[in-house]
Image (spheres, rainbow, N blue to C red):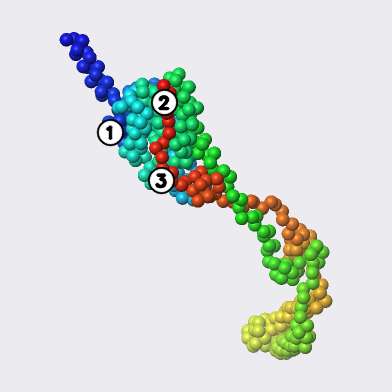
Amino acid sequence: MRWLIILLLLKTKCQAEEWDANNFPNPTAGQFLKCRMKTTANICDPDGVLSEQARYRLDHDLKQLESRTRQDHGRTFCEKKGVTAAMAVTRHVKGGSIEAVKMMANDILRKWTLDTQCQKAVVFVVSTDDMKFWVARDDRVPVYADEFTEIFEQQKSLFQQSNHQQALTNIMQKTWEKALSKQGSPKAGGGQPGPYPPSGGDSGMMDGGFKGKGGPDFKMPSIPGWFWAALVLVIIPLLCLCICCYCCCCRGKGSAGARAASRGVPMTDDGGMGGGSHRGGGGAGSMFRNIAGSAGGAGIGSLLGNLISGRRARGMGGGRYGGGMGMGGYGGGGYQGGGAYPAAPAIYDDNAGEGGGGLYPSKAVKDQGGGGSWA
């Protein structure tokens, strides 16, 4: 009777340890304690197949898989997002066959809803007593069924040596390496930008009109003939007439002020009658205004003379910006392209989902994943 009870207890225990997608804990949804983890995680090992250190190392590797497969140069959120990964480690899957393990992996992938938006998630399932391994994948994961099977075959010897942690770490590393190998190189940008034009242009006041005579690209401005005719026949005579009228009026006011001063009548600053000293204030003001007017006339005449004769004030460096406004140069020659232009940004494209333009494939490919047995 005692042996019968022991056998019944062992049978009950074995039945409780048979797992499928319906009774397996979800570490991403609050059942992490049943998975022997202290907080929300991406790995579940309810049977304690792995050591605590190995579980946390694999949980780190699962999160690294998502960050390593992220594409920051992608145009959309899903192109940028990496591959989300989760792992289920058991001793025995209900049924024990490769088909049972494959079914459990794909059922967990659908049940846990790791990435419903972008469909870039994988689930690794390991059954150590059954000696089976399988990877279920979402449709837009850039690693496909036959590639997962090939990756598993490369690590079969480690599974046979019961070095499960190292085998699983290598599988995840090979997964992100396979995904990144499909990115290819981005397309070259749209060419380098042309040189920036010098400030002001060739016809500007600071460039063509008053640039230094000694500049390497000095060129006399082209002035039409009608301008010279209008200048000589109209503008200059009118200017001379205005200057003469101004001087005559000022001298008349100055003389009146002087006569008033000689009679002892004070004058205001504008030559009018008013109080003040006996000195002719109007005469003095007129004198200063006459001097200023003469100086202004001389300055305008000099400027017109320079314009007619084609003379230019020399710039300090004779450069394109030399002799700015006829008062000296800013120095330097014409624009010499003082530095290399930055290359145009590369163009990242997944070639209509096929990958190879700097991004790995994003097209939907349906399959049941890959794996195998190491028995």
The amino acid at mark 1 is Asn
Residue indicated by mark 3: 118
- Tag 3 secondary structure: loop
Q: Dot 2: within a 10 Å radius of its alpha carbon, few (fewer than 14), some, or many (20 or more) residues?
A: some
* x, y percent for residue 279: 71, 82
Side (left or right) of 228 relative to 108: right
Residue 36 in sight here: no
Q: Distance between the residues labelled 1 and 2?
A: 23 Å
* x, y percent for residue 265: 67, 88
The amino acid at mark 3 is Cys
The quarter holding residue 196 reads bottom right
- Tag 2 secondary structure: strand
Residue for point 73% across, 80% down:
293
Position of residue 184 relative to residue 11, above or below, is: below
Which callout, 1 or 3, points to the residue nearer the camera?
A: 1
The quarter holding residue 337 reads bottom right
Position of residue 232 relative to residue 167, above or below, is: below
Which of the two labelled residues, at mark 1 and mark 3, occupies the earlier sequence position? 1
Residue for point 42% across, 28% down:
372
* x, y percent for residue 158: 47, 22
Which of the two labelled residues, at mark 1 and mark 2, occupies the earlier sequence position? 1
Residue indicated by mark 1: 22
Q: Do the residues labelled 1 and 2 touch (CB within 8 Å)?
A: no
Which callout, 1 or 2, points to the residue nearer the camera?
A: 2
The disc at residue 373 is 2
Side (left or right) of 267 relative to 16: right
* x, y percent for residue 275: 63, 84
Q: Distance between the residues labelled 3 and 2?
A: 30 Å
Q: Do the residues labelled 1 and 3 touch (CB within 8 Å)?
A: no
The amino acid at mark 2 is Ser
